[in-house]
Image (cartoon, rainbow, N blue to C red):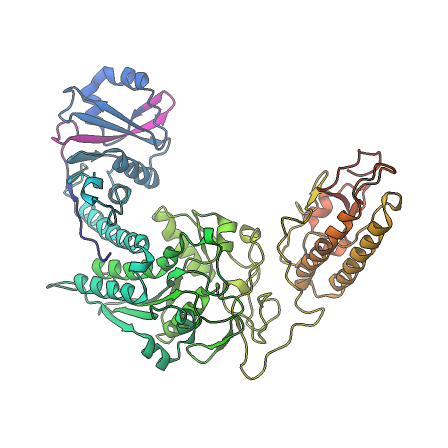
């Protein structure tokens, strides 16, 4: 079982010369410059040992210094070490470049018993970067290999060379980096462990064992732990955690950690999602989406190991950590769509999508966290898929109050961990229609990030799938009447024809802004000479739908107009197949799919959209269905 990992490779600081260090390999950085490539700071003694032969050697080997480049050079006695490893740093030498170069070197140097690393490390920041980069770059998970010893090619001894090795601040940076690395490696070990070996009870046991190892011995930090089983969760009324885990033979757990130093200057609450395996429940995931679902507990692993690191570093911060753990499985006892759960604190939630389980377990933990009145609550979770669509799979999204978001982003930048802010263009008000999730049936609004309208960085996210929503067990509120919250746009089906534009798209300059204005789509027209009777009937159906929704656009308050424009688009798409099917090209008369004309009322246009429109044109763009051939350009067509 993965726990708090014990170091296998020994790391030490020295101030020796890389040209005279007796190791199997020496790592030196190479920087790109106007003349080609040159040895980076830290490797000056190596450059001096090669003398005038160095530049021709680098040119012959094709060394450019590009970031990620690795070139191995047998030294033939020029320096004491038999192997020189040149690692590219790029054009700029900073902590991020050094950290990445160290990681590349760790993966490139194999089967060497001892390695000396002479990358730029003349400041505590760079020492921390070299240490973290090399150790994390050398990380491997071989616990389940048939012969893990053969798979282990890491060096037994790694020496970090820096002229400031004996300075107190350098030693402190080195030791702190090693603590952080152990926490990150422990998180990775838990995430990589197969889900059958890390069920909620086993995960809780692993955390308890890691806590025991951390707090053992004189002078060790004091970290308290409490593990709540399913009976205690039921007594507390944690319906979210129990509702997610009820379908699994492995019952859920809630692990609570506490670290309270006497000189604490702030109180931090950490909450991490711990779904040890997510099948989606009865709203089951596709098979291709389950392979990585053992990592759905990464949030819990991260906050637990962060607590260990804070305690080991002795930071003057009081920390209370909550790690709800459950396995979202399919069985006869699984929570069903339509079930109503009573959360910790008494709030009731109707479950519409059992694959939206993260918010359920986090809700119980977050309420318990608020009872401690912390200064800051940080919630770490692997949700949702929409964040991946908006920011990609290498950038984490950060949501919250501006002050805390800025602090998290600054910390992420210093750790070379890319994060992207996802802020609402206007404050969300609990209970307001503007702040309500499109899938909510609640009269009080739905909790969570789904209630916020993201900025452009998140605007590419697809519509959210129906998830759990808050409701009253005594009375279920009815769907909103027309003119209130508009219906969500249905995801486009692959079988439906999609839109394409000729010329500039009206959406380029008309994306939603703080006034609620959006890309205008309000009217549909088609030349009668090109239509079949069936196409005409289909067009009239589309026009009727759009006209009805367009009326809502004009009569709705500004904050709701952008949402109604989405409803107009949905109305057009819903009838598009009918129009397309009846408008196939006919050889006898040359009929084609009707031209769909998009008109925009001035009240919906942004200033940028108005400026982008030519003065002689009305706010019109013509679209064609991809399922039919496009007619040739005609004078005055506006295409």
Q: Position of residue 112 (x, y in %)?
A: 17, 33
Q: Quadrant of residue 12?
A: top left
Q: Which residue appears at 43% of the width and 70% of the height?
A: 363
Is residue 598 in view from this perspective?
no
Quarter holding the N terminus? bottom left
Asked whether 413 or 329 is in front, the reply is 329
| Quarter placement of the C terminus | top right
Residue 28 lies in the magenta stretch: yes
- Residue occupying the far bottom of the picture: 474
| Image: 502 above or below 296 | above
Residue 337 visible to an observer of this rendering: yes
User: Vertically, is 135 above or below 512?
Assistant: above
Counting from the top left corner in percent of width and height, residue 300 is at 34, 62
Question: Which region of the structure is painted magenta?
Answer: 16-37
| Residue at the front extreme, as displayed | 332
x and y, in percent, of residue 338 in the image: 54, 73
Q: Position of residue 414 (x, y in %)?
A: 35, 48
**Residue at the spot 29% in from the left edge and 39% down from the top edge:** 103
Which one is in front, 59 or 587? 587
Residue 66 lies in the magenta-colored region: no
Above or below, comparing residue 112 to residue 338 in the picture: above
């Amino acid at each position: 079982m993965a726990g708090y990992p014990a170091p296998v490779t020994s790391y030490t600081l020295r101030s020796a010369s890389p040209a005279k260090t007796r190791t199997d390999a020496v790592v030196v950085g190479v920087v790109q410059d106007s003349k080609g490539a040159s040895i980076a700071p830290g490797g000056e003694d190596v450059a001096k040992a090669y003398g005038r032969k160095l530049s021709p050697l680098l040119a012959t080997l094709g060394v450019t210094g590009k970031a990620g480049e690795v070139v191995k050079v047998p030294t033939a006695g020029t320096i004491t070490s038999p192997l020189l490893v040149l690692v590219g740093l790029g054009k700029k030498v900073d902590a991020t470049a050094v950290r990445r170069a160290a990681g590349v070197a760790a993966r490139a140097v194999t089967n060497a018993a001892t390695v000396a690393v002479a990358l730029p490390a003349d400041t505590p920041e760079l020492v921390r970067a070299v240490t973290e980069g090399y150790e994390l770059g050398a990380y491997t998970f071989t616990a389940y290999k048939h012969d893990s010893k053969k798979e282990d090619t890491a060096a037994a001894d790694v020496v970090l060379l820096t002229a400031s090795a004996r300075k107190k601040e350098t030693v402190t940076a080195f030791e702190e980096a090693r603590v952080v690395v152990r926490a990150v490696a422990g998180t990775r070990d838990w995430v990589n462990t197969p889900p059958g070996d890390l069920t909620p009870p086993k995960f809780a046991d692993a955390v308890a064992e890691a806590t025991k190892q951390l707090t053992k011995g004189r002078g060790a930090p004091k970290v308290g732990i409490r593990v709540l089983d399913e009976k205690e969760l039921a007594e507390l009324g944690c319906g979210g955690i129990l509702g997610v885990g009820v379908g699994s033979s492995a019952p859920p757990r809630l692990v609570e950690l506490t670290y309270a130093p006497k000189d604490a200057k702030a109180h931090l609450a950490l909450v991490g999602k711990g779904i040890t395996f997510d099948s989606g429940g009865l709203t089951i995931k596709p098979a291709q989406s389950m392979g990585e679902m053992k990592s759905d507990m990464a949030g819990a692993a991260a906050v637990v190991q962060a607590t260990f690191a804070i305690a080991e570093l002795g930071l003057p911060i009081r920390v209370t950590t909550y790690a709800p753990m459950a396995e979202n499985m399919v069985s006869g006892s699984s929570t069903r769509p339509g079930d109503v759960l009573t959360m910790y604190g008494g709030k009731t939630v109707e479950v519409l999508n059992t694959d939206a389980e993260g918010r359920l377990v986090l809700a119980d933990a977050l309420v318990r966290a608020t009872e401690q009145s912390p200064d800051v609550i940080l919630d770490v979770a692997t949700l949702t898929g929409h964040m991946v669509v908006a920011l990609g799979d290498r950038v984490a999204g950060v949501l919250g109050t501006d002050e805390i978001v800025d602090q998290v982003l600054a910390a992420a930048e210093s750790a070379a961990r890319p994060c992207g802010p996802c802020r609402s263009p206007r404050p969300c008000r609990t209970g307001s229609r503007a702040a309500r999730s499109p899938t909510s049936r609640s009269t009080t609004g739905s909790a969570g990030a789904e209630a916020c309208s993201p900025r452009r960085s998140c605007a590419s996210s697809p519509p959210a799938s129906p998830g759990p929503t808050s409701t009253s067990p005594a009375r279920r509120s009815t769907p909103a009447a027309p003119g209130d919250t508009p219906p969500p746009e249905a995801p486009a089906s692959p079988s439906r024809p999609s839109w394409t534009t000729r010329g500039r798209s009206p959406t380029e300059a008309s994306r939603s802004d703080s006034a609620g204005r959006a890309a205008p789509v309000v009217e549909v027209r088609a030349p009668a000479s090109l239509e079949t009777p069936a196409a005409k009937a289909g067009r009239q159906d589309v026009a009727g739908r759009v006209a009805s929704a367009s009326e809502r656009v004009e009569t709705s308050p500004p904050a709701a107009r952008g949402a109604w424009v989405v409803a107009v688009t949905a109305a057009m798409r819903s009838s598009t197949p009918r129009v397309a099917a009846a408008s196939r090209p006919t050889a006898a008369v040359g009929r084609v799919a009707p031209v769909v004309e998009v008109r925009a009322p001035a009240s919906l246009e942004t200033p940028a959209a108005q400026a982008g429109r030519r003065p002689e044109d009305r706010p019109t763009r013509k679209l064609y269905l991809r399922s039919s051939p496009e007619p040739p350009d005609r004078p005055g067509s506006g295409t």
